[in-house]
């Protein structure tokens, strides 16, 4: 699985950090998403899918 | 027989609808009926206009995230939530001394569309990043413990709203903003007036002006004597020409209102609902598992969905939703409370289940305007639900629930007072 984040769509709601803290973080300055792992391990798939589904700015895309 | 335009018009229901008697924590029965029968329909609102109303969870999410849906309160077709909000949700157009007309402007970025909405939101969103908010945990825990100490040392019964639920978020947000605590009573008295649907436009404007004047002065002071708080950060933006003084003042007001009564109402209503579910209350009281507390917070957010007036929007292009077309220029309402009871998404939606962990709920809205303060709300509620009932294990209502005055007229649902004892 490959994760693509579109920073300009991010609204810093923090949903992704709650769903998958090993994969997503936030910039200190404005809370915009930081992708920690572009190709996370399989055991994180559920968390990453939740993060993508919950993102209110639709800023996270997954390629399988 | 064919329905004429007149009989169709007569069939349009008024929105908002009333809750069922004896069901203070459930959405209005008429909304439930629409969820079952009509994914999209027309309703009549206070100003006589008839926006669309969308009931289903997936349709609301799709609509609220649509780039052609607008939250701009200066759009002439924007359906204002109440007379008071119609008078205060935008800065009216003005004519300058040299005869130039400055167009009306939304009150803050929450009533703007991108890209200006995003530009302004990003000026303050860093302060609400999950990890920065979680670093506030010890400070918030201390405030909660102190308030409980004071309550336990005082007379009983006591009003949980005044003694605990309102002071807590007020203290927290004022710390974040840098508002001196000595000025809290001033804020609480005035911010309590604004959400009421019965507040006249005149009173709303006057109240808002008093608060704005205060924040305006404080911002000027923060500009010359900056501290480590949000108002100082906003003052810096003003000095850099990135924000007008008025925009910064209004942003300060918005942050104050956004985090104050909302959190307070979740504390009080959450307590009432848990008291009605003693077995689940016992699990919340006794657990050492932070995951169960987090799940309790999400479930109470879903179950209560306190923004009882839906999200109001305007379509900028034709949008297909729920088998109908919302035409460009038409207005639409998404009542979040009924979406969070959609059985397609939440099985047995009317059952409170603290193990459910319904993270996908839209109690904070959806789309680019989703609540900025949600990590702070979650932190405060986690600390309250894991502390209050543990420290006061025999906490109970000091009166019958029938005697409790609910805020049926408010934009955000809650109760005016909750006498408790132990």
Image: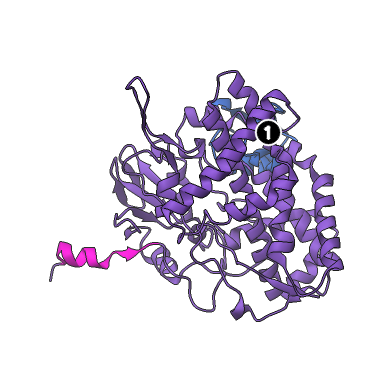
Q: Which of the image's four quarters has the C terminus of chain B?
A: bottom right
**B372 is within the stretch colored magenta:** no
Please determine whether, in this image, residue B120 is positioned above or below residue B176.
above
Question: Can see residue B299?
Answer: no
Please determine whether, in this image, residue A20 is positioned above or below residue B153.
above
Give the quadrant of residue B137: top right
Q: Which of the image's four quarters has the N terminus of chain B?
A: bottom left
Q: Colour of chain B?
A: purple
Give x and y (percent) for residue B364. Answer: 57, 49
Give x and y (percent) for residue B298. Answer: 66, 56
In the image, B117 versus B292, the foreground residue is B117
What residue lies at 68% left-to-right and 49% top-to-bottom? B377
What residue lies at 70% left-to-right and 59% top-to-bottom? B165
Residue labelled with disc 1:
B230
Please determine whether, in this image, residue B213 is positioned above or below residue B228.
below
**B9 is within the stretch colored magenta:** yes
């Amino acid at each position: 699985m490959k994760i693509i984040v579109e920073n300009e769509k991010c609204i810093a709601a923090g949903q992704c950090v709650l769903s998958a803290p090993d994969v997503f973080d936030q910039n200190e300055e404005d809370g915009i998403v930081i992708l920690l792992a572009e190709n996370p391990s399989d055991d994180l798939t559920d968390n990453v899918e939740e993060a993508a589904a919950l993102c209110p700015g639709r800023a996270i895309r997954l390629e399988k | 027989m064919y329905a004429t335009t007149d009989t169709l018009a007569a069939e349009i229901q008024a929105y908002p609808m009333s809750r069922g008697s004896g069901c203070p924590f459930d959405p209005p029965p008429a909304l439930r009926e629409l969820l079952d029968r009509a994914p999209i329909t027309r309703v009549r609102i206070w100003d006589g206009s008839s926006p669309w109303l969308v009931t289903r969870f997936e349709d609301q999410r799709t609509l609220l995230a649509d780039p052609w849906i607008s939250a701009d309160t200066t759009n002439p077709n924007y359906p204002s939530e109440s007379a008071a909000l119609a008078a205060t949700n935008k800065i009216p157009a003005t004519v300058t001394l040299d005869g130039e007309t400055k167009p009306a402007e939304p009150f803050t970025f929450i009533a703007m569309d991108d890209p200006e909405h995003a530009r302004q939101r990003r000026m303050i969103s860093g302060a609400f990043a999950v990890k920065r908010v979680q670093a506030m945990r010890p400070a918030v825990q201390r405030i909660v413990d102190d308030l409980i100490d004071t309550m336990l040392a005082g007379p009983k019964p006591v009003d949980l709203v005044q003694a605990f639920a309102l002071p807590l978020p007020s203290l927290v947000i004022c710390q974040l903003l840098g508002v001196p605590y000595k000025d809290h009573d001033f804020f609480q008295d005035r911010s309590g007036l604004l959400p009421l649907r019965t507040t006249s436009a005149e009173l709303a404007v006057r109240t808002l002006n008093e608060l704005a004047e205060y924040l305006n002065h404080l911002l000027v002071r923060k500009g010359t004597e900056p501290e480590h708080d949000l108002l100082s950060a906003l003052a810096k933006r003003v000095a850099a020409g990135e924000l007008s003084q008025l925009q910064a003042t209004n942003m300060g007001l918005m942050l104050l209102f956004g985090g104050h009564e909302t959190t307070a109402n979740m504390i009080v209503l959450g307590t009432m609902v848990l008291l009605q579910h003693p077995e689940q209350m016992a699990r919340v009281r006794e657990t050492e598992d932070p995951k169960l507390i987090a799940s309790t917070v999400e479930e109470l957010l879903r179950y209560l969905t306190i923004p009882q007036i839906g999200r109001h929007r305007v379509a900028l292009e034709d949008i297909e939703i729920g088998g109908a077309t919302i035409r460009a220029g038409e207005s639409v309402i998404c009542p979040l409370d009924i979406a969070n009871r959609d059985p397609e998404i939440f099985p047995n939606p009317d059952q409170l289940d603290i193990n459910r962990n319904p993270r996908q709920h839209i109690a904070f809205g959806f789309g680019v305007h989703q609540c900025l303060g949600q990590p702070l709300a979650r932190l405060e509620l986690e600390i309250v639900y894991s502390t209050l009932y543990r420290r006061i294990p025999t906490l109970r209502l000091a009166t019958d629930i029938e005697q409790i005055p609910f805020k049926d007229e408010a934009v955000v649902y809650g109760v005016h007072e909750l006498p408790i004892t132990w």
